Image (cartoon, rainbow, N blue to C red):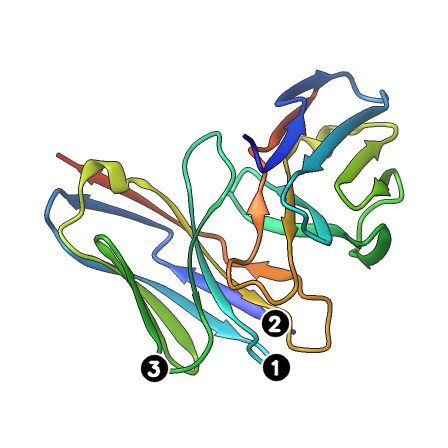
């Protein structure tokens, strides 16, 4: 069965203190791995899609990378406005329903 | 211009009542979803419709019934509400071949008392 596990569950950083969030997955055929950001009281907001091992994507202070078993979301010199829950998801293999299977999220708090 | 809109945003109701949540998307996407997010922020799929046809029906009590009158709308009706139904329900939409995954609504927080 497809599974996504994120770690740590919660992360507290000082402003400017870089770190990484981990997303481990087991899936029979990866169609895509997605990163979302969720702010309190809001729906998840799309950040990145990664399709194959070795792929990297960047947006401002965030960089997502992908291997055959896991993905990392690197946060460089974070600011308080980066505080949010970060969700990782894998998409059902090709030929299946296309549903996204989510991990439980990492809640990031960045203190000034 | 909201892409995926859900109503209501908050819903407080008593056990045993029947309630509905509505969702509309103006993105022209052909697939819509209902996800449930529990108190630990875990998002789990409930249903999916593609062009008004039900394609995903996960293990959900049959008190939950989705309805898609057209491909821009997906509603969720819940009968005989129970305390354990309290959660945040998210509607989402997607387009096959898109690199952007899902577009989510802002959620409906359902509290059953």
Residue A107 image-quadrant placement: top left
Residue A28, labelled with which disc?
1
Secondary element type, mark 3: loop
**Disc sitting over residue A2 in the figure:** 2
Question: Do tag 2 and tag 1 residues touch (Cβ < 8 Å)?
Answer: yes
Q: Position of residue B100 (x, y in %)?
A: 51, 58
Same chain for labels 3 and 1? Say yes or no: yes
* Circle nearer the N terminus (2, 3): 2
Q: Which one is nearer the viewer's eye here, B77 or B2?
A: B2
Q: Nearer the viewer, mark 3 or mark 1?
A: 3
In which quadrant is the C terminus of chain B drawn?
A: top right
- Which residue shows up at 72% across the image and 54% down it? B31
* Chain identity of mark 2: A
**Alpha-carbon span between mark 3 and mark 1:** 19 Å
In this view of the protein, which residue sits in the foreground, A91 or B98? B98
Query: Which of the two discs, 2 and 3, sits closer to the camera?
Result: 3
SS class, disc 2? loop
Q: Which mark is residue B73?
A: none
Front residue of B97/B41: it is B97
């Amino acid at each position: 069965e497809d599974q996504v596990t994120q770690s740590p569950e919660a992360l507290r950083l000082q402003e400017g203190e870089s770190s990484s969030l981990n997303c481990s997955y087991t899936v029979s055929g990866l169609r895509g791995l997605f990163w979302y950001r969720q702010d309190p009281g809001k729906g998840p907001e799309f950040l990145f899609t990664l399709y194959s091992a070795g792929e990297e994507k960047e947006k401002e202070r965030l960089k997502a990378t992908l291997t055959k078993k896991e993905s990392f979301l690197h946060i460089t010199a974070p600011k308080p406005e980066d505080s949010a829950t970060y969700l990782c998801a894998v998409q059902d293999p090709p030929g299946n329903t296309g549903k996204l299977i989510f991990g439980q999220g990492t809640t990031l708090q960045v203190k000034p | 211009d909201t892409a995926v809109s859900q109503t209501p945003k908050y819903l407080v109701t008593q056990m045993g009542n029947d309630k509905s949540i509505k969702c509309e998307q103006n993105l022209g996407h052909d697939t819509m979803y209902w996800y449930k997010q529990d108190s630990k922020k875990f998002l789990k799929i409930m249903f999916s419709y593609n062009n008004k046809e039900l394609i995903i029906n996960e293990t959900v009590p049959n008190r939950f019934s989705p309805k898609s009158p057209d491909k821009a709308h997906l509603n969720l009706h819940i009968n005989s509400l129970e305390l354990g139904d309290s959660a945040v329900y998210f509607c989402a939409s997607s387009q096959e071949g898109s690199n952007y995954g899902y577009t989510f609504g802002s959620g409906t927080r359902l509290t059953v008392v």
